[in-house]
Amino acid sequence: MKEIAVANQSEGTIRRSFSISPRTSPLFPFFIFVGFFLIWPIISLIIRSFKGNEDEWTFANYSPLLHGSYFHAFVVSIKLASITALIGAILGSFFVYAIVNNAGPRVTSVLDSVCAVFANSGGVPLAFMFIAAFGTEGLFTKFLKSIGWDIYAGKFTLFSFTGVVLVYSFFQIPLMILVFKPALQGLRKEWSEASINLGANSTTYWRHVVIPILTPSFLSAFFLLFAGGFSAYATARAMTVGTVPLVPIIIGTLVDGNVISNQTNLGDALAVGMIVVAGVAMSGYLIAQRRANRWRAA
Amino acid sequence: MRFSPSKIVTITLATLLAVLIFLLPLVAASEYSFRGAGGKGHSFINYQWLVQQDGFASHLLTSLQLAVLAGLLNLILMVPTAVLLHISLKRWRPIVDFICILPLIIPVVSLAIGAQVSMPKIVQNTQYELVFFFVIIALPFTYRTLDTSLSSIDLKTLVEASRSLGAHWITTIVRVIVPSIKGGITGALFLSFALSLGEFTITSLLHWDTFPTWTVVAAQQNILGAIALSVFSFVGAVLLMIIISTFAVRKRSASISHIEEVIA
Amino acid sequence: MSTLETVQRVSSKLELRNIYRKFGQVVALDDFNLTVEPGELIALLGPSGCGKTTALRIIAGLERVDSGRLDVNGIDYVAKPANQRDMGMVFQSYSLFPNMTVSENIEYGLRVRKIDSSKRKKIIYEKLELVALAQKSNSYPHQLSGGQQQRVALARALAIEPTVLLLDEPLSALDAQVRAQIREEIRRIQLSLGITTIFVTHDQEEAMSIADRVGVMSHGKLEQIDQPITIYNNPLTPFVASFVGEANRIPAELAEPGYVKVLEQTIRVANQSFDHSHGLPVSALVRPESLQIASESEGTPGQVVIKSFLGPLTKLGITIEGGLMVHINVASKEVSSVDIGNRISFKIVAEEVMVESA
């Protein structure tokens, strides 16, 4: 705690002393709030996941996760997250590349806001929109039929794994653009000019400078997309109840009481399982992010 | 800007892809939403239907109420916290940074389940419990926005100046700091508001009924109406953001040219 | 191509002729001509926007030329790709590749030239010794100070053994103290290598202290290029006179042709090409050291309002009738008894003064 005392020696004036930093206690509201509404629910969740039907300590809630349909659900969820994250990362990178070098400031700021809206879209509105566009009566479907491609001729349905991948891409790609664009913008013009000046061509520059510099940012963005794709609930629920085994949905059905299980706290175990997977992804994100920031400082 | 062939190819390809992936579904959905009764023809009938539904207004109001409360609570909690962390108490920054990332790490689903278990009865009896969770969910975004905003002003100097002139802490925050980070505060408020309005997961899992959950139920009766709403809210949000960002850019350049006039 | 000796080196002669370059509506270079002899260090000096950086970048090949010639040792380089010009360049900031160590940065140009590993090691070591940073070879740029980074950038540019060295305001982003130190190092290295060098800066002290010749630029044109002492003592235009060194702008009247009346004295006009005929008000540019304290009968009276002690010299700010403040530099010993508020007289002791429109 710093204290700056301004003392005035002349008679009659008040000696003023003030501190520019109050004590720690003003942070208490934050910690109390977060502790009660975030930390405590998670801790009690974890505790309950280890409690059996008779309130005894047990691993029984976790065993269904290790095989069978619940394990399969984790596999599918992880698959979904990986694929949509990959699609988002690759296509998003391409868009970022196109934007950064070619778009003026006005276009960029408009694109920023549009991406922000798209990236946060999801849930029910998004699902409905895709149902409208790609459903059996949708414009898209009709259009494709008219050019000879009846997407419903086979077993395609929007309410499937592929359908969900399609819909998730709609927000994964913009999210990638938002998160990855700063990284590309951080590539200094001086580096490419220095490279040219030293005699190198484009390929060399990309191989030895650009790729190494961008990789951590790219990876961290990928992990972020993965975590989002894994944890998403609303969109999937609007589209796939029952048809695609996804962990968030299963938890939802357990909670709604639509599915009864012998293990009353199975839902808790599943929820903790989700935390673990998302946690691993986010650690990847944090580590890659730290790496990327090291070079920003230079 | 020189337009080399490779640039043209890139821009064209990107635009085509963007239109295909993003614009077409929007357009198709919009078209669908204007379909008339029985799926024939086009009219506003779906939008009319939706607005006329029982519960449209009440649920919308509920959601708006919760969103406003969540936004305010977010600011009241986070502005002082962010300011404090910037001026002093730097030790706590890593911890707070991590805590504010947590809502991204912990799936909302898990938080909802945990909340069910842990929240005492008094809290669980009112739908206002959602306000607290909306704040938590928005935490990463609001904290980040405020943090960035505070980093861009010389906070320490402002505070020292204000305090040395005799102002109390609250005066300093309200009259000096808040006006300086207006942009960040508006941004944080917006984000929080938008998130709360559209939040479905926790609301549904805690068995409350807000506008998003009501839409799903209404959709079961008339999918077209629900689609109309989705399209409307989406397109509306995009247009709103474009307008805001255009104005923001214009305002900035207006003030810069004014300064240039003054100097020249 | 690479020799390991740092003594004799081939360096190039540069000739820029009638270079014209426009960006949108702004003319960056207008009929720009410059000849740089082998081994010379030329400083391009001027305010922002004068075109000095554009000229440098054109030489490097990083900017196109709208019209004009660029010859290096008599060979037309205008169309030559930038990565084939064999010139070393140091940028103002962010020069180094952040993902590579100091050694790897320096090695970059060598690897491009397919120089084998053991030779590369030798060259890297040599260059690091040259800039006195041998112990930092495995450090990353973000671990170095600004001054160290620029020295590594210099080493990297020199590693490819270029025949021309280009420096784009290399010291502008550094602290004042570091700046003075490194500019001397740059000059020392340049002299020992004998390499043709172009140094762009807006800091006149920098330019004047290390260059063989200084080219003062304004609005895309080269106003004057001469040895530093000539630029200072014999500026050719009012712009050069006021940009380099200090100048008092004193209202004056045109007297008989070729002469101007300023502060009751009639003095020859230095820039004879100045158009006298219009009868518009003019200002005379007088350096502080061209003014001396005089007796009341000989000089112009005024009141001392500022006294700044600068060591051997003291700068006095004197307000004369009409409100104008004039700066004069006097030996400190002479004015030890002069205080703020005193009345004092001074006169011009230059044989000629530069004149410009008021």
Image (cartoon, coloured by chain):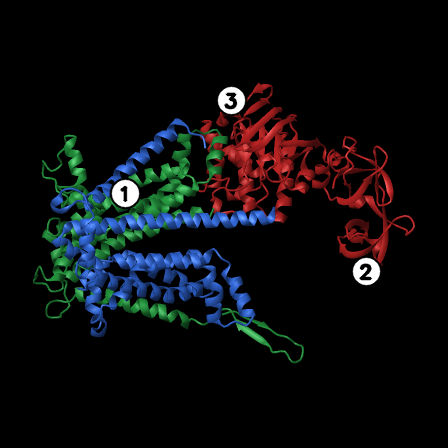
Chain colours: A green, B blue, C red
Task: Classify residue C244 by image quadrant.
Answer: top right
Helix, strand or loop status at disc 3: loop
What residue type is disc 1 on? Answer: Gly
The spot of residue B45 in percent (x, y) is: 18, 49
The spot of residue A284 in percent (x, y) is: 30, 50
- Chain ID of residue with mark 1: A
The spot of residue B26 in percent (x, y) is: 24, 43
Decide: is A179 above or below B134: above
Which residue in the structure is indicated by mark 1? A88
State the residue in front, B157 or C282: C282
Helix, strand or loop status at disc 2: loop
Task: State if disc 2 and disc 3 touch (CB < 8 Å).
Answer: no
Q: Earlier in the sequence, mark 3 or mark 2?
A: 3
Decide: is B84 above or below C39: below
Estimate the spatial distance between the alpha carbons at disc 3 and disc 1, rounded to whole Å.
41 Å
> Dot 3, crowdedness within 10 Å: few (<14), some or many (≥20)?
few
Helix, strand or loop status at disc 1: helix
Q: Which mark is residue C53?
A: none
Estimate the spatial distance between the alpha carbons at disc 3 and disc 2, rounded to whole Å.
64 Å
State the residue in front, A70 or A157: A157
Q: Which mark is residue C79?
A: 3
Which residue in the structure is indicated by mark 2? C341
Left or right: C341 with respect to A203? right
The spot of residue A122 in percent (x, y) is: 24, 51
